[in-house]
Image (cartoon, grey):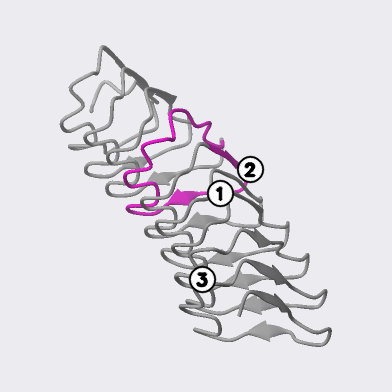
Amino acid sequence: IEKVAIPKGVTKIGDNAFEGCTKLHTVTMPKGLKKIGGNAFWQCVKLKNATIPKGVGEIGNGAFAFCAIKKITLPEGVEKIGDMVFYCSKVESITIPKSIKTIPEGAFRGAKLRKILIKEGCTEIGRWAFYYCQSLTSITLPSTLKTIGDAAFFGAGIKQITIPKNVETIKEDAFGQSPLEKITIPKKTKNADYALQYCFELKEATILNPNL
């Protein structure tokens, strides 16, 4: 299979539907689609062209893992993306809509991500979310963010970051082994134990909570 046009009337792409279709390069999805199942396009290593239509509310675990898509838009209204949804994919640019409150475990782990816009509304970045995204050199986090998970940016390429003022928890190894040079941790942050382990390039850390 090299090209798929999913017909009008289909509301769900099932789990593992096109898993391992290594020659698939183009998928057209219909209006009215509500859900993309887990591992739906897992290891579709040549898949470069796919547009997620408005109306999709959920994208399952590993749905686009290992895919060759470089740019993809998650439409407003998507409320849930699964663990490892873009794991080791070639996605370089993506926007997280305000309808997504949590970026889950390993969502972009090992991806070729260079640019990401996380809109206001997201409250949590899960563990390993951007683990070893070495091409990701900068990111702006939304003011609604409250939690940054374990190893969320471990080994990522980020050199400078300002943590939003409402972040309360930065978990272990959140920025571990990153080339981070400058960071500001806000007053509301109550826990940031071991968050900066092995940040050997760190030159400036501003910590506004005297009790940390």
Q: Gap between marks 1 and 2, in whole Å?
A: 7 Å
For the residues bearing labels 1 and 2, Cβ distance under 8 angstroms: yes
Q: Which residue does the numbered mark 1 point to in the structure image?
A: 122
- Disc 1 residue type (three-letter): Cys
In the image: residue 13, left or right of residue 89: right
The answer to whether residue 34 is left or right of residue 112 is right
In this orientation, which residue lies closer to the viewer: 211 or 173?
173
- Which of these two is toward me, 194 or 153? 153
Element type at mark 1 = loop
Neighbours of disc 1 within 10 Å: few (<14), some (14-19), many (20+): many
Q: Secondary structure at mark 3?
A: loop
Q: Residue at x 71, y 62 (%)?
A: 51
Which quarter of the rendering shows the N terminus?
A: bottom right
Query: How far from the left and from the top, in percent, is residue 80?
Result: 57, 66
- Farthest residue in the top direction? 203
Q: Earlier in the sequence, mark 1 or mark 3?
A: 3
Circles 3 and 2, Cβ within 8 Å, touching? The answer is no
Q: Residue at x 24, y 18 (%)?
A: 202
Q: Residues within 10 Å of mark 2 (few under 14, many from 20)?
A: some
C-alpha distance separating marks 3 and 2: 22 Å
Q: Earlier in the sequence, mark 3 or mark 2?
A: 3
Which mark lies nearer to you, 1 or 3? 3
Residue with the mark numbered 3: 63
In the image, taking residue 158 as reference, residue 97 lies left or right, namely right
Give the number of the mark in front: 3 or 2: 3
Whether residue 140 is in magenta: the answer is yes
Q: Amino acid at mark 3?
A: Ala
Residue numbers of the magenta segment = 115-142
**Above or below, 70 relative to 174:** below
Give the amino acid type for the residue marked by disc 2 in the picture. Lys
- Which residue is the site of mark 2? 119
